[in-house]
Amino acid sequence: MSDRPVIVFDSGIGGLTVLRELRVVMPDRRFLYVADDAGFPYGDWEEAALVERIVALFDDLLTEHDPALAVIACNTASTLVMPALRARFSIPFVGTVPAIKPAAERTRSGLVSVLATPGTVRRDYTRGLIDQFARECHVRLVGSARLAPMAEHFLRTGTVDPEELLAEAGDCFLEQAGRRTDIVVLACTHYPFLANALRKVAPWPVDWLDPAEAIARQALKLLPEPPATLPEGFDRVIFTSGSADHATRRLLHGFGLETAA
Ligand code: DGL
């Protein structure tokens, strides 16, 4: 029996949308949340530099924390770095990639949009998902550099400007030959925090697809053996900047996370 932690990794606090689903399917696990806030946002990073950065971070994380599994709760990272992580480390890694396959299976109009960071939109991996699973659909990729920072701001302050939100997400809504986009894939783990605000500014109702639950179930499959005892107290969070502000620490405390020493 093992109580090795499960690492949940993101560039910021977007991975909390995945952590909450992980806790539902594996309440008996100890989690270590890692926010690479010193590298945030990942959306515009050059690819080779981002791979190098994340692999180096995991070198240290694995040495210091001996995790049982790591969830890369970030599309921008997962669409790029999974092969390098799996080649270098022996623990299982679960990635978060745009939910294009389920969107293609569910759409009725055949018009699907993928809302993501510019990095995720640019990736060969994302284009490959469309080629493999959504050939019959019209998939529109919408990249926004501002939405992830807006989601961070929203979580800390509770405010988001509806006009700015529509300016970032408005391109997701397409009308063509009497048909309309009916599914928007939330392909950045920060965005589910904005889902209610997005619903309010949407020109028509769509299904906003959040893959967090599916990711949690996939992680559970790779972790069959529950720990001997239920963990007590708070899970921990590491900020790579080492200097998260008071508001952020308070926020994460509300998610049952306390700053690791
Ligand atoms: N949460 C991350 C994702 O899922 C990216 C946010 C960012 O660093 O811009 O893509």
Image (cartoon, helix red, strand yellow):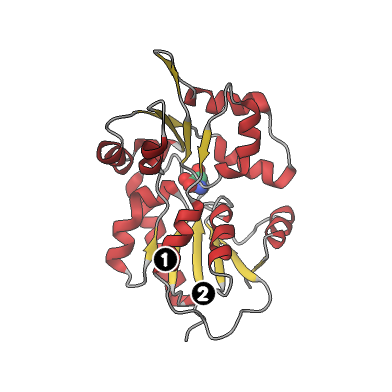
Front disc: 1 or 2: 2
Among numbered discs 1 and 2, the one appearing first in the sequence: 2
Give the vertical position of 131 relative to 164 (above or below). below
In percent of width and height, residue 39 lies at: 50, 51
Per the rendering, the mark at residue 58 is: 1
On the rendered image, what quadrant is the C terminus found in? bottom right
Query: Mark 1 belongs to which amino acid?
Result: Phe
Question: Can residue 26 be spotted in the picture?
Answer: yes
Side of 154 where 64 appears, left or right: left
Task: Mark 2 and ligand 1: say if the CB distance to the nearest ligand atom is below 8 Å.
Answer: no
Point 67% across, 59% down: residue: 252
Point 36% across, 68% down: residue: 92
Mark 1 crowdedness (10 Å alpha carbons): few <14, some 14-19, many ≥20: some
Q: What element carries label 1?
A: helix
Give the vertical position of 136 relative to 190 (above or below). above
- The CA span between labels 1 and 2 is 14 Å
Query: Mark 2 belongs to which amino acid?
Result: Pro
Question: Can residue 37 be spotted in the picture?
Answer: no
Give the vertical position of 141 relative to 22 (above or below). above
In percent of width and height, residue 195 lies at: 60, 39
Side of 153 where 61 appears, left or right: left
Using the rendered view, name the quadrant where residue 69 is placed.
Answer: bottom left
Task: Mark 1 and ligand 1: say if the CB distance to the nearest ligand atom is below 8 Å.
Answer: no
Mark 2 crowdedness (10 Å alpha carbons): few <14, some 14-19, many ≥20: many
Q: Mark 2 points at which residue?
A: 5
